[in-house]
Amino acid sequence: MSRKDVFANLQPPAPAQPEIRTAKNRLRPILGSPELLENGSRSPVGAIGQSLSEVNDRNRRAEEIERRLSQGHAVISLDTADIDPSFIPDRMPGAKEAHDRLVASIREQGQQVPILVRPHPEIPGRYQVAFGHRRLRAITELGQQINAIVRELSDEQLVVAQGQENNERQDLTYIEKARFAQRLQQRFPRDVIMAAMSLYKSDLSNMLSVVSRIPAELIDMIGPAPSVGRRSWMELSDLLSTDKVVDRAKAFLERSEIAEWESEDRFKALMEHLKPRPQKAKSDVWATGTGARLAKVTHNDTRVEILIDRREAPEFAAFVLDRLKALFEEHRSKN
């Protein structure tokens, strides 16, 4: 399936609008510019940790994109009880503080940007969210009607709109994006997933590898971990190499004091708990019967080091060097 096919029915009937010039032009297909479908380039998902100014700039662009979506389409008020979430969830339970801030903002200033929904494909009279899940939860809590744009969207168009809007805001964490990609993989080909998430093939493969190697139950216990990026999740997946290690991780996260920590703190504590601790090396000193020092031997489970001071025992040092190869050959012949 080509990207042009994915977005063909998303063309708004309104006259052509001025082009929005964003830094990455990631969401142009949603805005209905067919000449850009084959020429517009997409960059991979950027690093999670960005400066506050960059994040704010991306949020402004995402809001502008959503406003453009409303042009040529009626914004209507819907009862939140008639709206269901997307059939493929993308977020894990977030911080209560962020939700409370959004509720307070909408209470004081009203809903500034409508959400995007489609008529529910299976239940007449109901709707399904493409994006705007957090606004839906906040306005549901306030007991208000929600402003929404209703569009006929196929499953592919819905997940592309959902994924790209989230990607432009860049407030999904790495592991949330990885799980979203994994859920999409169960229903859609990889070209749809890459279009939805603005990913290169290699980035998508890495995400799917990480999330397939970490049990879903363990990810739920850790949480979204906002400050934890790709390398740290890959390192964790490498540590979880056996069922025994996975069981250790679960037992650690089940501790009541750990469960009360912030998500990223749980992740860091788990990594520290699972990393092998280097054993302290033991040292011995070899000496003659008269007390003359021959060598210092340092050893642990992985290494043996013999240090001979030629000033103390020059003849013994020469003897060891001369006999070392012969000792190895003797050992090999016995085994």
Image (cartoon, rainbow, N blue to C red):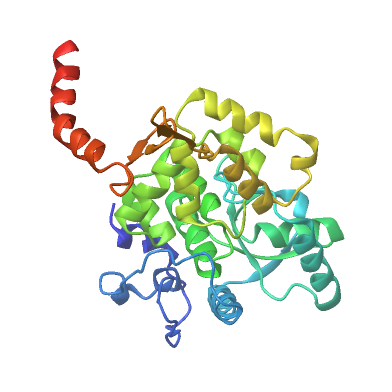
In the picture, the quarter occupied by the C terminus is top left
Q: Is residue 117 left or right of residue 94?
A: left
In the image, 331: left or right of 147?
Answer: left
Task: Indicate left or right for 216 with 35 as reference.
Answer: right
Residue 149 rendering spot, x and y as whole percentages? 61, 66
Q: Residue at x 18, y 11 (%)?
A: 334
Could one spot residue 162 in this view of the protein? yes
* Residue ID at (71%, 76%): 112
Q: Residue at x 79, y 45 (%)?
A: 260
- Answer whether residue 223 is visible to the viewer in this image: no
Q: Nearer the viewer, residue 67 or 315?
A: 315
Q: Nearer the viewer, residue 29 or 13?
A: 29
- Compared with residue 222, is residue 15 higher up or lower down, i.e. above or below? below
Residue 56 in the image, given as x and y percentages of width and height: 60, 79
Q: Position of residue 94 (x, y in %)?
A: 70, 54
Which quarter of the figure has residue 69?
bottom right
How many marks the image carries: the answer is: 0
The single residue placed furthest to the top in the displayed view is 334
Percent coordinates x, y for residue 187 in the rendering: 42, 40
Q: Residue furthest front?
A: 290
Q: Is residue 178 above or below residue 71?
A: above
Q: Which quarter of the picture shows residue 24? A: bottom left
Tell whether 291 sits left or right of 249.
Answer: left
Residue 198 lies in quadrant: bottom left
